[in-house]
Image (tube, grey):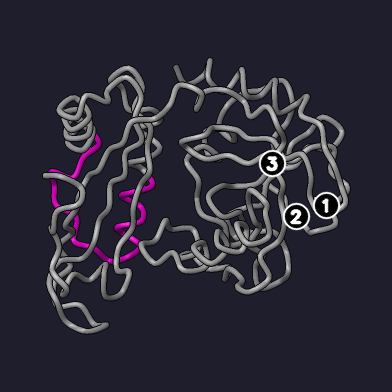
Amino acid sequence: MAGDKPLLTVDNRSFRYGDGCFETMKVYQGQLLLADLHFERLIASLHLLHFHIPAHFTKDYFANLIKELCRLNSVSDLARVRLTVWRAGTGLYDPVDHTPHFIIQCWELPEHIFELNSTGLLLDIFPDAVKSCDKIANVKSNNCLPYVLAALYAKQHQVNETILLNQHGRVADSTIANIFIVRNNNAYTPPLTEGGVCGVMRKHLLQKDFPFRITEQPLTVRDLETADEIFLTNAIYGIRWVGRFRNSSYGNATSAILHEMLYESML
């Protein structure tokens, strides 16, 4: 079915309440990258949101559907895939059915998605919403209003990304990515208890053995301003380095090394 054709009813709980979650994934040469981590997060999110998970909701089940959809749309070489899950049925805030329904979409990606950005990103802070430091904050929820408004703020203020802070005024994550800083050849990223989304690329980096240490540590705005480097990660772009945050500017030596090692570890 074409992406512009009606598919969902107005009673859909994702439309009405944002009741569900999603995964954004990358397919390369017919293979779903970081599939284990994506479906580990998906199942954990469904448990946290009290869905009744069918026995056939396995990694292989979804991976086969995704690969077949990409093949039918002739985008298997390089594609962005979104798997959206929502709670079935109607009801008000109190659901009457906890069965998950889902839809899969795919789009072709350009080859340069594998390249490290040549120009550093411009970064700022989104001042109008904060992330709570609870378990729901780690879910890629279908309710994305803080990130939508943060993206609008970035566009209005002519920056590439904006940072969302948590209730304590510390760094949670950014509009579409997790955030890392580099200081003295070591990298740091906020722990999930700081309210950021549980990023798949973030988890992949934390699990890999790199020639420098990557540590979870709460980050303040001052930490960003005094860092040697800042880079952002997500499943589509991999790593993107930041060139400027407010009055501070940064290089990309460590980010460039990590970028090369990242794709060697994935492909």
As shown in the figure, which amino acid type bears the numbered disc 2?
A: Leu
Residue drawn at (70%, 23%), measured in percent from left and top?
A: 256
Which residue is denoted by mark 3 in the rendering? 121
The amino acid marked with disc number 3 is Leu
* Disc 3 to disc 1: CB gap under 8 Å: no
- Distance from label 2 to label 3 (Cα)? 19 Å
For marks 3 and 1, give the CA distance.
18 Å
Chain part drawn in magenta: 41-59
Q: Quadrant of residue 188?
A: top right
Question: Foreground residue, 11 or 89?
Answer: 11
Please check the rendered image and state whether residue 49 is part of the magenta-colored stretch, yes or no: yes
Numbered-mark total: 3
Q: Amino acid at mark 1?
A: Asp
SS at badge 2 = loop
Whether residue 221 is in magenta: the answer is no
Could you tell me which residue is drawn at 13 percent across and 43 percent down?
Answer: 56
Identify which residue is drawn at 16% across, 81% down.
91
Q: Position of residue 207 (x, y in %)?
A: 55, 32
> What is the crowding at mark 2: few (fewer than 14 residues within 10 Å), some, or many (at least 20)?
many
Judge whether 52 appears above or below 238 on screen: below
Residue 174 locus on image (x, y percent)? 60, 54
Residue corresponding to mark 2? 219
Q: Position of residue 57 (x, y in %)?
A: 18, 45
Mark 1 = which residue?
A: 223
Say which label, 3 or 1, has the lower sequence index.
3
From the viewer's perspective, tell me whether residue 160 is left or right of residue 136. Answer: right
